[in-house]
Amino acid sequence: MTTIILAATGFDGEAALVTSAPGAGITVARRSLDAVDLLAAAVADPSMPIVLTGEVPRISPDIMARLLAGKRTVIGLAADDAAAQLLRILGVTRITKIHPTAESTMRAVASEILHGVTGVWDTGSWRPKDMQMVPQAAQLGGQLVAVWGPAGAPGRTGIAIALADAFARQGVSTCLVDGDTYAPAVCFNLGILNDTSGIVVACRNADNGTLTSRSLQLSASVLRGQLHVLGGIPRVDRWPDLRHSALTSVWTTARAAFTRTVIDVGPCIEDEGGVVQHGGGTLLSSRRNAAAVTALTAADVVVAVTRDDPLAISRLVTGLPAVTGLGVSTPIIVALIQSGDRRSGPALDALRSSGINLQVVPIPFDAGGYRRALAQGALLAEVAPRSPALKGIAALSKVIATEMATR
């Protein structure tokens, strides 16, 4: 007998499915009434298959992503195209058609669990499971740049803003995203006061299945020309609005909506605790760092920002292994902010002696230019067009373009 968790609240034939399950070789161990109850049942048994409809109360793509994270078998039940589409929005890819009788439905479920042969519902026709779909991200031409730096390395947001502006001035459709859940400051730096937190709106659209290239573009503020800004959370306690699965959808959609997307992320990328399920999983864990983690893993290039003083270098050296530990295999470029009249040689030597063999781009620090830009809520190129920092940013943009061209 195959034991399952059944979550079919709202389906008139739910009771019939339970009573007919033994005849199909299935035991319904638990009947979940809503998403909270389903999560609790999933935590109790991390390996038990789940069978559900898309009408489970309070179910969301984020909850579904957590259920699927451990490679658990999740089977959706759909009666028609609309129900199948709802399940796909939630993230369910294995969908079984509801048959005329409950027993035949449960037999189809059992066959899908054991053999995976029933196929998936796709616009009214059954498509064999051996047909491979081309991943959406592979079809999209946009590129993502994640700008990260360890704690205590000021200059990350300034680099992200100037880099996005450099791309936009090249005539490239660019979106600057504030993905920092600890100290969001992009809108403050640019004097955008009436922002409605574009990233929160985009994540909500991702959750309810209405996120498109057009809706993402409308969620962003047009700063000037080709430069768009997707503002961050209005308060740091709003970080739960940025859920892992929603953010992943936002980054994928950004590839279709913009040619370049520059994401300013916070320094923290470790698992930050929360309630941990039996066996060490993180089904119910807290995910404040989801924005940084998803951006780093989705990026085509990572820019690691640091300064040329010993403390900042040591923090970068100790922080980089956490980045690579996420599975980041894309190029990492170090943006080395030069303080005052210091030469970059000693800092480069310190990096090399620590085993960090990455491409480094020195960027002069223009304190006066940045102060004027911040005071006016303007871009550095607008208030200090001859700033030496812009030459460093231009060099950085060329290195990034070269790395992207080879991918």
Image (cartoon, rainbow, N blue to C red):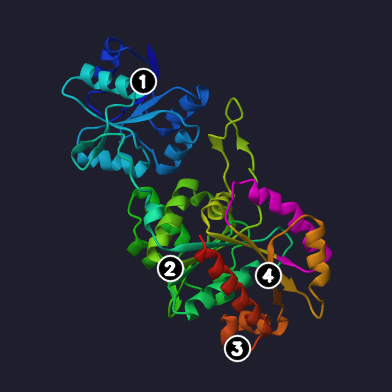
Instruction: Give the label, 4 or 2, closer to the camera.
Output: 2
Specify the amino acid type for callout 2: Thr
Q: How far apart are the two marked residues, 1 and 3, measured between alpha carbons?
A: 65 Å
Magenta part, dominant SS: helix
Instruction: Give the label, 1 or 4, closer to the camera.
Output: 1
Q: Is residue 114 above or below residue 214?
A: above
Name the mark on residue 385.
3
- Where is residue 353 shown, x and y percent of the image? 82, 58
Q: Nearer the viewer, residue 144 or 49?
A: 144
Name the mark on residue 114.
1
For the magenta stretch, what is the residue range?
306-330
Q: How far apart are the two marked residues, 4 and 3, measured between alpha carbons?
A: 19 Å
Q: Secondary structure at mark 2?
A: loop
In the drawing, does residue 386 fall left or right of residue 63? right
Q: Secondary structure at mark 1?
A: helix
Specify the amino acid type for callout 3: Pro
Classify 10 Å Cα crowding around label 2: few (below 14), some (14-19), many (20 and above). many
Task: Determine which residue is flagged by label 2.
Answer: 259
Q: Which quadrant, please, contains the N terminus?
A: top left
Q: How far apart are the two marked residues, 4 and 2, measured between alpha carbons?
A: 24 Å
Specify the amino acid type for callout 1: Leu
Residue 313 appears in the picture as rendered: yes
Q: Earlier in the sequence, mark 4 or mark 2?
A: 4
